[in-house]
Amino acid sequence: MMADNPTLLYLTDLYYPAKGRDYYEEDLYITSQFKEHFNILIGNPQQALAFLDKAEIIVFRNTGPVAYYQDYFNEFVEAVKQKGIPTFNSFDGKADMKGKQYLLDLFAQDFPVIPTIDKISDLNLLSPSQEYMIKLKNGADSIGMEKVSRAEINEADLKSKLIQPFIDFEYEVSFYFINNEFQYALYAPNKDKRWDLKLYDASTDDLAFAQKFIDWNNMQRGIQRVDACKLTDGSLLLVELEDLNPFLSLDLLSDDLKRAFIKKFVLSLKEITF
């Protein structure tokens, strides 16, 4: 490794208990592939401020929901901006990076998203449903999510929450992008096993659907994951747009796909540092 390689601060919570995912395996694999290109520091996201003076670039990866350390995260983002340290992802996304408000905004703009409201008075905007999902606007990783019946919805506490009808879909599918370029897609054939994924052969229409949200987000740089559900009529609806620290499920890819992804990842980082 050359001494003049840029120093990369790789932030991850290696042992965050993510259901169905092993953060440490994915991040140890990625950093093992980076070592020929960067001087790497691996740090916990809640200790990042102590290492900023050593970092030429910061990679923000599997850090867990920042809602658990929101004040520290806000301080970190401000410090990074003040010091002019480039981050990957860039902190200019408009989707999950900012909470769930974007789902309300996109629904109001007639984007193909799961219908989303935040007022009981707007229930008429949703198709009739026997069950509804209530989610925190600043939630992540299913934090605070609950299912309620049609009879219960009028009594629900909706402060800082949103409402969606319970959708009977065929399966979930995720599209993965680096710097707005599609890389691969995975889907969950069994909708009760969200992280039991298989490679998905995305059609032209599928990719046009996913690209629509990538273009809307217009993020400067980073990895994004477009999560959607496939309905019985074959159409797709957005579930969420992960634009801060999406899990990549690299262990499920072929060696060729993994190598191609890492190559693109490295090149994207070098475009910033060189």
Image (cartoon, helix red, strand yellow):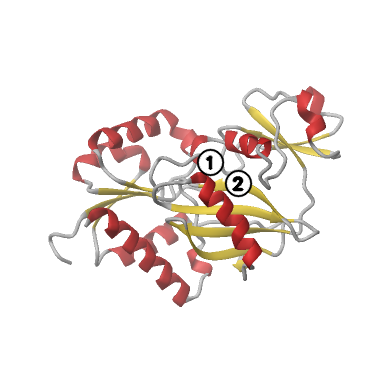
Q: Residue at x 32, y 31 (%)?
A: 78
Q: Residue at x 26, y 42 (%)?
A: 85
Residue 90, image x, y percentages: 38, 45
Corner quadrant of residue 29 = bottom left
Q: CA distance from mark 1 to mark 2?
A: 7 Å
Marks 1 & 2, CB-CB < 8 Å contact: yes
27 vs 203, left or right, is: left
Corner quadrant of residue 211 = bottom right
213 vs 170, left or right, is: left
251 vs 39, left or right, is: right
Please give the residue where the numbered disc 2 appears in the rendered image. Answer: 240
Q: Which mark identifies residue 43?
A: none
User: Dot 1 surroundings within 10 Å: few (below 14), some, or many (20 or more)?
Assistant: many
Residue 216, image x, y percentages: 53, 46
Given the image, on which type of amino acid does mark 2 rest? Glu
Closest to the observer: 264 or 195? 264
Q: Residue at x 39, y 31 (%)?
A: 74
Residue 36, image x, y percentages: 24, 67
Element type where label 2 sits in the image = strand
Does the image show residue 196?
no
Q: Quadrant of the C terminus?
A: bottom left
Please give the residue where the numbered disc 1 appears in the rendered image. Answer: 96
* Looking at the image, residue 99 lies above or below residue 166: above
Given the image, on which type of amino acid does mark 1 rest? Asp
User: Dot 2 surroundings within 10 Å: few (below 14), some, or many (20 or more)?
Assistant: many
220 vs 143, left or right, is: left
Q: Earlier in the sequence, mark 1 or mark 2?
A: 1
